[in-house]
Image (cartoon, rainbow, N blue to C red):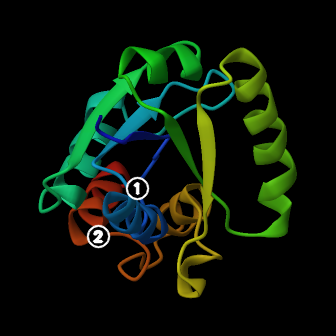
Amino acid sequence: MKKIAVYPGSFDPITFGHIDIIERAVTLFDKVIVTVSQNFEKTPWFSVPERCEMIQSSVADLSNCEVDHFKGLLVEYVSRKHATAIIRGLRALSDFEFEFKMALMNRSLAEDITTVFMMPHAKYTHVSSSLVREVAGLGGDVSMLVPAHVAGMLKKKFV
């Protein structure tokens, strides 16, 4: 049986920190599905198709990585995809409390799904999509935080 993991997130936009986690996750699982989740508590800058396009361009060289999107309950999506793991990134201790609660909730809803916490390389622990948007919105250079195609899409947002 193939080991399939789902890496959900808003990815608004995808950053080098996300990509670092994806690149390591594909070595641990037979297939990794990076999925854009629609978080109703956030107002995204990019549409779901735009975010999927950014991710697809960022992971095009990873043969066992797929890009998708979903609405609804994560564990239901994970089950439909026949996955057994949810990948969550942790940058700092402050991320852990929220992610720990989510992992426990997901486990109470679907005991057969495991949450795997992964940390990005130390050089990306300060990087978040919201900080990237803030820097880009103020005209700053984000080329060291996101791939070139993502930086281009951010630049177009402010022209």
The answer for how far apart the CA atoms under marks 1 and 2 are is 8 Å
Residue at which label 2 appears = 147
Q: Amino acid at mark 1?
A: Ile
Picture quadrant where residue 67 is located: top left
**Residue appearing at x 51%, y 24% in the figure:** 38
Residue 155 position within the rendered picture, expressed as x and y whole percent measured from the top left = 32, 61
Label 2 element class: loop
Q: Pointer 1 and pointer 2: residues touching (CB < 8 Å)?
A: yes
Quadrant in which the C terminus appears: bottom left
Q: Amino acid at mark 2?
A: Pro
Along the line of sight, the residue nearer the viewer: 108 or 139: 108
Q: Residues within 10 Å of mark 2 (few under 14, many from 20)?
A: some
Q: Is residue 88 above or below residue 37?
A: below
Mark found first going from the N terminus, 1 or 2: 1
Residue at which label 1 appears = 14
**Residue appearing at x 35%, y 22% in the figure:** 81
Residue 85 position within the rendered picture, expressed as x and y whole percent measured from the top left = 51, 39
Q: Residues within 10 Å of mark 1 (few under 14, many from 20)?
A: many
Residue 50 position within the rendered picture, expressed as x and y whole percent measured from the top left = 27, 38
